[in-house]
Each structure stands twice: as structure tokens, then as C-alpha cells.
Image (cartoon, rainbow, N blue to C red):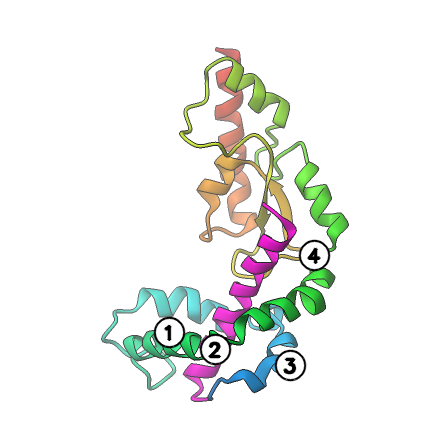
Amino acid sequence: MTYLSKSNDSFKSRLRIFLFDKIIHGKAVDSSLLEEFLEYDLSEKQDLIKKYAAEFFHTERGETLPGTEMQIDAIYITIKETERKLKAVLPQWRKEYFHKVFKKQLHPDKFKALQEANECYYCNITVDEIVELAKSNKLFKKNERGWRMEIDRKAPNQEYSDNNCEPICYWCNNAKTDEFSAEEFKPIGMAIGNALRARLKN
């Protein structure tokens, strides 16, 4: 988990919605739209994000996307074709995004604080408790994640930013995915924390 990798993830989030927006409104996308892309503000696109996440991915491929005249299949294919056409310029777009957008949205100091956090925002489990669970042979994950906090986007379809990021443990991150908002997940997270701490007592 590096600062650049989070920038790339954030870039992908913006690019997906940007392309979706242009395509369902019948607008062409080419390399001349870099500045428009850099100024594209996902925080102002809540309805569009909902249409993308809740309608586009949950409507049958042969059906028409509600509110448009385009079939789901056609949108999907057009997005892929557009990404292929932009392939040569996307590295430059990604670089420009990192320097002109991402560094302002998620400050390096905030990123460092998130990396060094000792407690999960959702379940309050600490790194020390996780280490204690591991030493007691009470963890059963089958990967190398979990030894420190990860970074969660409270609003999962928004970009990484100072206001949208909190430290999250591996178990809460796996459970929250992109499905739950921070408010929805908080009681679920507390239950996860309670279950993990109960192991320490047994």
C-alpha cells in the first residue's frame, strides 16, 4: 500500500464515472479532455454514481439503462472501446492526476497518519490486539494482510481524500467492501471487534 498505488486507485474511480457519464450522454471522449477530467468532481456526482453502481451493474445485459436509450451491453462495450482508444494517453492522465489532483485531495501527511494508525475506525481493534491474537493462534486468515491498518474510503465510490479516508482493519475491510457506507457499517464493525476480542478471553 503506497501513496502512488492509492492515487492510481483513486484515478480509476474518477475515470470510470467520467467515461460512464460521457457515454450515456452520447458524448465522445478523446485525449483533448484531460483538463475537463482533472476538474471533474465526483463529490458533485452522487446521482450519477448511484446510477453506475446500483443500476448499470444490476440491470440485465440486454436491457436498457433506466433514463437512457442505451442497452447495458452497448454501454459496457463502448466503455471498453474508449479505454482502448485512450490507452496511449492514460499514463499521462494518471501522472497529471497524481500531481494536480491527488496530492491536494489526500495530503501526504494524512496518508502517513493513516498508515501508522493503531486502531480500526469501525471495530476499534488495535494492532497490539491483532498481534496478541496471532501469537495465541487465534487468527485463521490465509494471507499476509492484517498486521497493520489499511485505508478505507467511507463513501466507497468516491475518491481517496482527507475527509473520505479512515484506518480500517483487514477483517472490517473485507466485510465492508464497496457495499456499505461508513454509517451503515459501524455497527457491523463493532460486532466484528467484539467477536475478535472475545477470542482473546477464551
Mark earlier in primary sequence (4, 2): 2
Mark 4 residue type: Leu
- Point out the tag, 1 or 2, that comes first from the N-terminus: 1
Residue farthest toward the front in the current orientation of the protein: 88
- Whole-percent x, y for residue 36 in the image: 62, 82
Which residue occupies the foreground of this view, 156 or 66?
156
**Element assignment for label 2:** loop
Is residue 106 rendered to the left or right of residue 196? right
Residue 167 shows up from this direction: yes
- Using residue 114 as the reference point, say whether residue 66 is left or right of it: left
Callout 4 secondary element: loop
Asked if the residue under mark 2 is in contact with the one under mark 1, i.e. CB atoms within 8 Å, the reply is no
Amino acid carrying label 1: it is: Lys
Q: Which residue is mark 1?
A: 80
Q: Is residue 177 magenta?
A: no
Position of residue 159 relative to residue 143, above or below, is: below
Badge number at residue 190: none
- The picture quadrant where one finds residue 147 is top right
Q: Residue at x 43, y 82 (%)?
A: 23
Indicate the position of residue 33 as horizontal and vertical percent values. 58, 84
Viewer-nearest of labels 3 and 4? 3
What is the chief secondary structure element of the magenta stretch? helix
Report the disc number at residue 86: 2
In this picture, residue 65 sits left or right of residue 31: left
Residue at mark 3: 35
Viewer-proximal residue among 194 and 88: 88
Q: Amino acid at mark 3?
A: Glu
* Residue ID at (64%, 81%): 35
> Which mark identifies residue 106?
4
Q: CA distance from mark 3 to mark 2?
A: 15 Å
Front residue of 61/59: it is 61
Q: Foreground mark, 4 or 1?
A: 1
